[in-house]
Image (cartoon, rainbow, N blue to C red):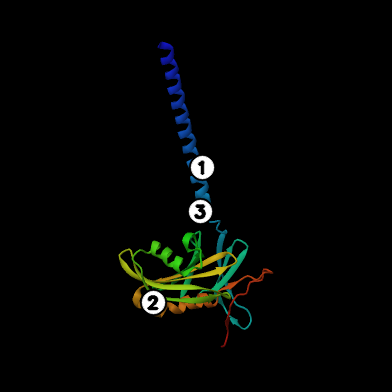
């Protein structure tokens, strides 16, 4: 009957409208969830800044030191002789050997690397360096905190490289120290990495920051 057909058409149209509305709601909900998830996955990294200063004083040789600010935390370390510090990047400090055979960088660890779990760190490093071949694993201390260290060989821009990465906890979160060299100069350049780590200092709760200076023995 005509009346029944009209009712059926109205019912079908109503159902289609509800389906379309439900689909729209689901899409918007998915977009909001994605937006929320993206905000949650972005770690709130502390504001980073760094400057290089010459320090000395009576009884000390003039040496070059790096002062780093990460949020409310402050750090310092001495630039090894024969190297220079670059603050050109926004999220890290690079120490470059004058002959360009070695680069050591310091930054706040991000993403999957912001952890102290060695297994998770290995997986995260594999994500960054898919062809890496692990050659050593140990621990290291910087500013009275201990963290894991990994040595591995990998390729970069078609060249074989050897890298050491250390992850050390701090008041600003996990810090990443990374040294990259050619495999045949890795051993010789370890002194640069070690001096940076050994002279690395963190500010105390009262805000004081120690700077490791070179004694003048002349």
How much space separates mark 1 and mark 2, taking CA atoms?
A: 48 Å
Q: Residue furthest right?
A: 206
Classify residue 8 as left or right of residue 201. left
Contact check, label 3 and label 1, Cβ < 8 Å: no
Eye-nearest disc, 1 or 2: 1
Report the residue at 37% width, 64% height from top: 129
Q: Which residue is mark 1?
A: 32
Q: Around disc 3, counting alpha carbons within 10 Å, would you say few (fewer than 14), some (14 to 19), or many (20 or more)?
A: few
Q: Which mark is residue 41?
A: 3
Q: Tell me which label, 3 or 2, sits earlier in the chain.
A: 3
Tell me the SS state at disc 2.
Answer: helix
Eye-nearest disc, 3 or 2: 3
Q: Around disc 2, counting alpha carbons within 10 Å, would you say few (fewer than 14), some (14 to 19), or many (20 or more)?
A: some
Q: Split into 4 quadrants, where in the image is the C terminus?
A: bottom right
The location of residue 140, given as percent across then percent down, is: 50, 76
Classify residue 156 as left or right of residue 32. left
Q: Nearer the viewer, residue 87 or 25?
A: 25
Report the residue at 48% width, 37% height from top: 26
Q: Nearer the viewer, residue 95 or 217?
A: 95
The location of residue 90, given as percent across then percent down, is: 50, 59
Q: Tell me which label, 3 or 1, sits earlier in the chain.
A: 1
Contact check, label 1 and label 2, Cβ < 8 Å: no
The location of residue 91, given as percent across then percent down, is: 50, 60
Contact check, label 3 and label 2, Cβ < 8 Å: no
Q: Tell me which label, 1 or 2, sits earlier in the chain.
A: 1
Tell me the SS state at disc 1.
Answer: helix
Report the residue at 56% width, 64% height from top: 173
Tell me the SS state at disc 3.
Answer: helix
How much space separates mark 3 and mark 2, taking CA atoms?
A: 35 Å
Q: Which residue is mark 2?
A: 186
Can the viewer see residue 149 in this picture? yes
């Amino acid at each position: 009957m005509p009346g029944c057909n009209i009712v059926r058409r109205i019912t079908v149209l109503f159902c289609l409208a509800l389906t379309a509305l439900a689909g729209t709601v689901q899409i918007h909900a998915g977009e909001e969830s994605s937006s929320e998830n993206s905000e949650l996955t972005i770690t709130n990294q502390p504001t980073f800044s760094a400057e290089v200063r010459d320090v000395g004083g009576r009884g000390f040789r003039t040496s070059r030191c790096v002062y780093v600010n990460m949020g409310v935390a402050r750090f310092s370390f001495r630039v090894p002789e024969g190297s220079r510090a670059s603050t050109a990047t926004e999220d890290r400090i690079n120490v470059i050997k004058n002959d360009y055979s070695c680069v050591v960088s310091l930054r706040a660890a991000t993403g999957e690397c912001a952890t102290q779990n060695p297994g998770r760190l290995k997986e995260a490093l594999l994500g960054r360096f898919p062809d890496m071949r692990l050659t050593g694993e140990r621990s290291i201390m910087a500013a009275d905190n201990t963290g894991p260290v990994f040595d591995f060989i990998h390729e970069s821009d078609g060249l074989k490289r050897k890298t050491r990465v250390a992850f050390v906890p701090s008041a600003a979160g996990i810090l990443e120290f990374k040294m990259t060299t050619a495999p045949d100069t890795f051993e010789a350049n370890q002194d640069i990495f070690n001096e940076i780590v050994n002279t690395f200092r963190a500010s105390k709760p009262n805000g004081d920051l120690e700077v490791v200076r070179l004694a003048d023995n002349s």
